[in-house]
Image: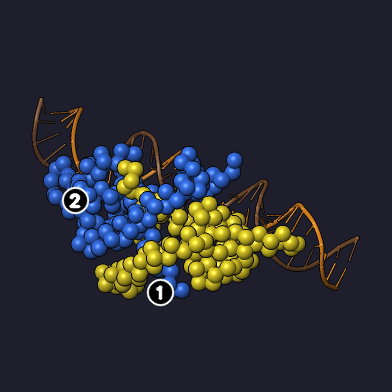
Chain colours: A yellow, B blue, C brown, D orange
Amino acid sequence: MSTFCKFETALEILVGKWKPVILLRLFSNGTMRFSELQKAIPDITKKMLTQQLRELEYHDIVHREIYRQIPPKVEYSITEYGKGMATILQALNDWGVAHVEHLNELYGTNHSVEAHRSDAMDK
Amino acid sequence: MSTFCKFETALEILVGKWKPVILLRLFSNGTMRFSELQKAIPDITKKMLTQQLRELEYHDIVHREIYRQIPPKVEYSITEYGKGMATILQALNDWGVAHVEHLNELYGTNHSVEAHRSDAMDK
DNA sequence: AAACGTAGTATACAAAAAGAAACCTAAGGT
DNA sequence: ACCTTAGGTTTCTTTTTGTATACTACGTTT
């Protein structure tokens, strides 16, 4: 129970509506400041962005560099440790791509994956 | 945007408070009936168990075999396709185990991972 | 003196997910 | 006639997540 099922722990880090896209941005763009992330992810609110970044920071995936200036400047980047996630992230992504293909074969192209999470299965 | 970030799709399948533990059970025990799963996962409600199983079934990860008897008998198992997830699941689990270790190094043994998801970061 | 820009917080509210508990079905046993 | 069983479904409540909007701090620019 303790050493099994730790993949829940792994999941925790990736879960949260915005973490995947934040990580994607940081992995591909390198260092970004808060406002750049906001622009890159138009629909995210400040609150969510802050919250998700703090969680990633706690897990040592993201580094937060504060410049004591006015107006403030804060830069975010993937930590060295965080870069170690690239492999699984890639694997997960690859599997996801293949899976969408699989679902297409099963149900045809006109289906919505999202519509089949949780509730939403009622007519 | 379309072919990247499909790891969100992958995540959807694993996410949901109970999916990891359900998958774990089915992977290690093979075929199980509804009531066996309930016993194996004491805190889950029927509602949640049904819901999560249906989602896994939709994604072709879990197979549902109905025996038309009274009282009913329904057996669940991992599909052939679903077995293909074993590798990533294992990878995710291994990474999770290592990550817990990493967090221990950073914060010491007496910390709660759960307490650092989402909110809960207030004193 | 007022406005601007950045990286947030605070507060209030809406929506989604999860939990609890009761109800349903139909055959077989008492 | 009623109870039991297995595998659910329904309804209702609570908890968790996410959104929207306002406000702050403080030097610089207008």
Q: Quadrant of residue A39?
A: bottom right
Nearest the viewer among A106 and D27 is D27
Name the residue beneath numbered marker 2: B30
Separation (CA) of disc 2 from disc 1: 33 Å
Q: Mark 1 Cα within 10 Å, few/some/many (few <14, many 20+)?
A: few
Q: Secondary structure at mark 1?
A: loop
In the depicted structure, whether residue A119 falls above or below residue B10: above
Residue A1 - label: none
Nearest the viewer among D10 and A47 is A47
What amino acid is at disc 1? Answer: Thr
Comes first in the chain, label 2 or label 1:
1
Q: Residue at x 45, y 55 (%)?
A: A13
Host chain of mark 2: B
Q: Residue at x 17, y 53 (%)?
A: B65
Q: Residue at x 31, y 47 (%)?
A: A4
Nearest the viewer among A16 and D12 is A16
In the depicted structure, whether residue A66 falls above or below residue D9: below
Name the residue beneath numbered marker 1: B3
Give left or right: position of D21 versus D5: right
What amino acid is at disc 2? Answer: Gly
Q: Position of residue B72 (x, y in %)?
A: 17, 44
Q: Residue pushed farthest front?
A: B105
